[in-house]
Image (spheres, coloured by chain):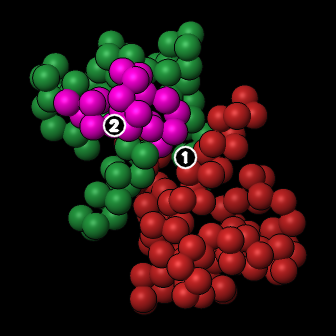
Chain colours: A red, B green
Amino acid sequence: MESAITKLVDVFKSYAGKDKQLGTKEFRKLVRAELKNLITCTEDDKAVDDLKHKTDKNNDGKISFEEYFILVTELATKIYKLQ
Amino acid sequence: MESAITKLVDVFKSYAGKDKQLGTKEFRKLVRAELKNLITCTEDDKAVDDLKHKTDKNNDGKISFEEYFILVTELATKIYKLQ
């Protein structure tokens, strides 16, 4: 469990920019590389940008660690409910 | 990333009771087996029960998947801030 939590932290850090957040380019890269089974249309820029917009709770154009982990929680809940 | 999220869902399900929640006994087992590095005093019943009480947001004596994932988020944030 601990390694899974650490992995999720490391994934965010590996894609985040110098400002420790995910801009549009970084978010697209993360989604395409890491979430291609859990999220549909990851190759469609508009679909991924729409997801980013929904994830960007404070609408500053960037995804913070906190916002990223809200997305992780939503995905985990989706998996949990589907099983 | 997807396997890490799935792992966290599977851990909850493997400890949850028939009611799909974690009672005191199940929560102690999970914390002792899965979180002995991230959480201190896991062998101390009182310390673990205090954590359970804090995690039990609706105070029904049980930890739901949602409450469990709030704890996961808190642990991830702790790791992120320490790195």
Q: Which residue is mark 1?
A: B4
Q: Are marks 1 and 2 on the same chain?
A: yes
- Residue sitting at 45 percent across and 38 percent down? B67
Quick one: label 1 or label 2, which is nearer the N terminus?
Answer: 1
Residue placed at 50% from the left, 13% from the top?
B17
Secondary structure beneath dot 2 equals helix
Seen at 57% across and 55% down, the residue is A72
- Whether the magenta-drawn stretch holds residue B1 is answered as no
Query: Nearer the viewer's eye, disc 1 or disc 2?
Result: 2
**Residue that mark 2 sits on:** B55
Callout 1: residue from which chain? B
Q: Is residue B78 above or below residue B21?
A: below
Region of the chain picked out in magenta, as a range = B50-69
Q: Quadrant of the N terminus of chain A?
A: top left
Question: What's the amino acid at mark 2?
Answer: Thr
x, y percentage for residue B50?
19, 30
